[in-house]
Amino acid sequence: MPGAPNPYVDSGPWGHVYIGGFRVPGVVESIDGAERPEEWDVQKPTKKGGASTVWKGTAIADSIKIVTSLHDKASVDNYTRMRDLLRPPKSTDAPPALPIVSPIVNFNGITRVAYRSMSPPEWVKSGGYWKGTITVIDFSPPKEVKTGVARPKIGRRTITEEQVDPNQDKKDRFAELAEQVKRVNRRRSEGGRIRNAGQGG
């Protein structure tokens, strides 16, 4: 992410995660799955030697896991509040897409996430504290696609690189109408000369 702090210069932001303006409680232990991998299709030819790779697009981070240790009562209470923030108010509603601020998550361009799951606080016997896991998904809204009757695309150049005027059809029509006007005026002029000649005889 451009402008992300260098952890050797300022490591503070790298240990915090904010979702919807609410700080993930406790001490963040790890963040996994915050990558947007490029998807490739490896095609193996049947008659020619050597395989080929075809790029299929950029995938989303569909399972970002944030593990945090909850060392006191306040952090457990805030963990429950975060659950209520992330989950939709009604079971029939989709989880809200919320901004996320974390150098680790933002590094690959992930800026908004939605709720996927949250584990209940889990007791870590060896450390004597509770632990929670928040799982979110990289939010990627659907892109609008124009629908309707297919129309031929007006190109600026032909296949021979000849310049094409997209308004040429209108200009041709205008020239045709102008020619018709000239013909009408010419006939009127010729008719007037004939009448004048007849009157003079």
Image: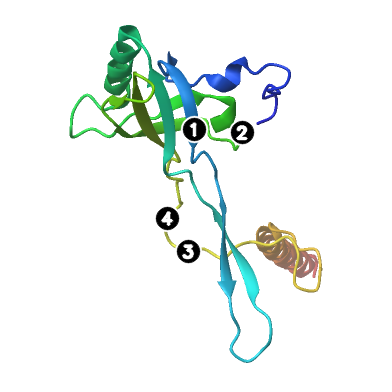
Q: Which residue is mark 2?
A: 107
Taking the image as shown, residue 56 lies to the left or right of residue 184, namely: left
**Secondary structure type for disc 4:** loop
Q: Above or below — where is 78 with respect to 94? A: above
Q: CA distance from mark 1 to mark 3?
A: 47 Å
Which image quarter holds the N terminus?
Answer: top right
Q: Mark 1 falls on what kind of element?
A: strand
Residues at marks 1 and 4, CA–CA distance in whole angstroms: 41 Å
Question: Which residue is found at the position 36% from the left and 30% from the top?
Answer: 133
Q: What is the three-letter code of the residue carrying label 2? A: Phe
CA separation in Å, label 1 and label 2: 12 Å
The residue closer to the viewer here, 2 or 10, is 10
Q: For the residue marked with disc 4, what is the amino acid? A: Thr
> Mark number for residue 31?
1
Q: Earlier in the sequence, mark 1 or mark 3?
A: 1
Q: Say whether residue 138 is visible.
A: no
Give the position of the C terminus as an image quadrant.
bottom right
